Image (tube, rainbow, N blue to C red):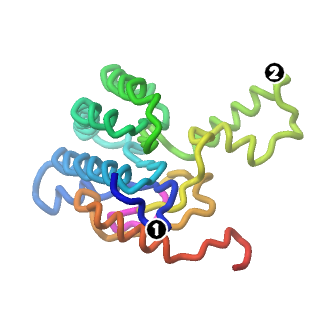
Amino acid sequence: MAARQENAPVHAAIIMDGNGRWAENKGISKYFGHDAGMRAMTAIVRHASDIGIQYLTVYAFSTENWKRGAEEISGIFKLLMIYVDKELDELWRNNVKVNVVGDTSEMPKDVRKYLERTVSRTAENTGLVFNICLGYGSRAEIVRAARRLAEDALAGNLAVGAIDEKALASRLYTGDMPDPDFIIRPGGEKRLSNFLLWQAAYSEFIFSDVLWPDFTPEEFDNAIMAFSARKRRFGGRS
């Protein structure tokens, strides 16, 4: 393992944006853009593990992505299974723990099977926690947490007066993890796109014009350097 970089964040999150535009710029199918995006993700996961990042959360497929064409969606799921099948042994050897964050119930059964196998195989690993957000939307996540609070209150397991930020946060998908220190969005856009809305309350943001397939470990290191140079006051004063 490489030496941990000074002032490296504990939890980094990435909105992986630009696969389609990358492919269009090259005059090729979006499938190859998503394939290049998967390879970029593989390199970043490996690098994040090497430099000692403890949590890495990536936005891979949102609730809104279901609006895309059937061929593109099918290609994304096919590539996801290829990635899981190809990288599982390395993830396990490198002590990476994989979590799937989001609602995968509408995904094809074979995709869910591959994902479940990956989560199960790496469940006892103690290194980098790699969260793959699939079928994920932050508003839906907050609604889900609110429903769980209501169910607990109706069952008599939670007093209404005990419902606070901590209670709601504990019922999010990431309830047992620290909030992201910073969020990277390659691809030139400057918005959250329904990603980690609750958790990002005090996250730093790094925007890059580099399209995701071209986002390298060096770009990741540059983002960490930019993050490390910022003074985080969380609403207080230095």
The part of the chain drawn in magenta is 185-192
**Total number of numbered labels?**
2
User: Is 222 positioned to the left or the right of 39 in the image?
Assistant: right
* Side of 165 relative to 83 (left or right): right
Quarter of the image holding residue 168? top right
Reading the image, the residue beneath label 1 is: 6
Helix, strand or loop at disc 1?
Answer: loop
Predominant SS of the magenta segment? loop
On the picture, is 214 further left or further right than 223?
A: left
Q: Where is residue 158 in the image (x, y as percent from the top left)?
A: 83, 30
Going from N to C along the chain, the mark reached first, 2 or 1, is 1
Element on which disc 2 rests: loop
The front one of 129 and 156 is: 129
Image point 33% across, 40% down: which residue? 94
Specify whether residue 190 is painted magenta.
yes
Q: Which residue sits at x=34%, y=33%?
A: 92
Residue 140 visible in the shown view: no
Inspect the image, locate mark 2, and give the three-letter code of the amino acid beneath it: Ala
Type of amino acid under label 1: Glu
Q: Where is residue 82 shown, x and y percent of the image?
A: 22, 33
Q: Position of residue 50 (x, y in %)?
A: 35, 52
Query: In the displayed structure, does residue 26 sit left or right of residue 143?
Result: left
**Which residue lies at the image location 27% right of the left edge and 63% below the top edge?**
211
Instruction: Looking at this view, name the residue that lies furthest to the bottom.
Output: 238
Which residue is the site of mark 2?
155
Rendered-image quadrant of the C terminus: bottom right
Residue at the limit of the structure toward the left, as seen here: 27
Q: Quadrant of residue 76?
A: top left
Based on the picture, tell me whether residue 44 belongs to the magenta stretch.
no
